């Protein structure tokens, strides 16, 4: 009985694990922009100014006139701007979002 229950749970887990992998494979060819942190090299040249290193994480970032403790994020030509350091991200539709 224990073997049957274990086999059933393993099958359910495999079904849940396999579904996202198939969805990810369909996006493998798409150009995605890093969503959690954007270093200076990932920004277009005109936005690579006022760059510094974050004292907490040690990673480089650029402010581009955003102000103290803000980071510039670039998602697409239509969506870019400022968020607190480490809190900005690009959603799956290519729009900039700032997590509180």
Image: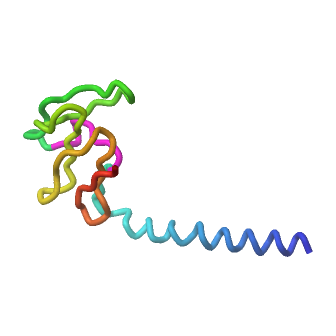
Q: Which residue does the image show at 44% across and 65% down from the upper left?
A: 24
Residue 38 forms part of the magenta stretch: yes
Magenta stretch, main secondary structure class? loop
Instruction: Determine whether, in the image, residue 41 is placed left or right of residue 7.
Output: left
User: Farthest residue in the front direction?
Assistant: 100
The magenta region covers 35-43
Q: Quadrant of the N terminus?
A: bottom right
Residue 60 forms part of the magenta stretch: no
Which of the colour schemes (rainbow, by chain, secondary structure, one colour) is used? rainbow
Note whether 71 is above or below 32 in the view shown: above
Residue 52 picture quarter? top left
The percent coordinates of residue 11 (x first, y second) are 71, 73
Q: Which residue does the image show at 30% across and 60% down from the upper left?
A: 91
User: Farthest residue in the right direction?
Assistant: 1
Q: Which residue does the image show at 32% across and 42% down from the upper left?
A: 37
Note whether 9 is above or below 37 in the view shown: below
The percent coordinates of residue 89 (x first, y second) are 30, 51
Instruction: Determine whether, in the image, residue 65 is placed left or right of residue 27.
Output: left
Residue 65 picture quarter? top left
Q: Nearer the viewer, residue 98 or 41?
A: 98
The percent coordinates of residue 36 (x first, y second) are 35, 46
Instruction: Determine whether, in the image, residue 22 is placed left or right of residue 82.
Output: right
Instruction: Determine whether, in the image, residue 77 is placed left or right of residue 41.
Output: left
The percent coordinates of residue 73 (x first, y second) are 22, 46
Instruction: Report the label total.
Output: 0
Q: Nearer the viewer, residue 90 or 31?
A: 90
Residue 72 picture quarter? top left
Q: Which residue does the image show at 50% across and 68% down from the upper left?
A: 20
């Amino acid at each position: 009985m224990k073997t049957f229950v274990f086999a059933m749970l393993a099958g359910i887990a495999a079904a849940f694990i396999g579904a996202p992998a198939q969805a990810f494979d369909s996006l493998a060819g798409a150009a995605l922009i890093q969503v959690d942190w954007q270093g200076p090299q990932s920004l277009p040249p005109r936005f690579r100014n006022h760059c510094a290193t974050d004292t907490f994480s040690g990673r480089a970032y650029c402010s581009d006139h955003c102000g103290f403790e803000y980071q510039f994020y670039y998602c697409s030509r239509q969506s870019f701007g400022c968020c607190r350091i480490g809190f900005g991200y690009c959603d799956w539709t290519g729009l900039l979002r700032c997590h509180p």
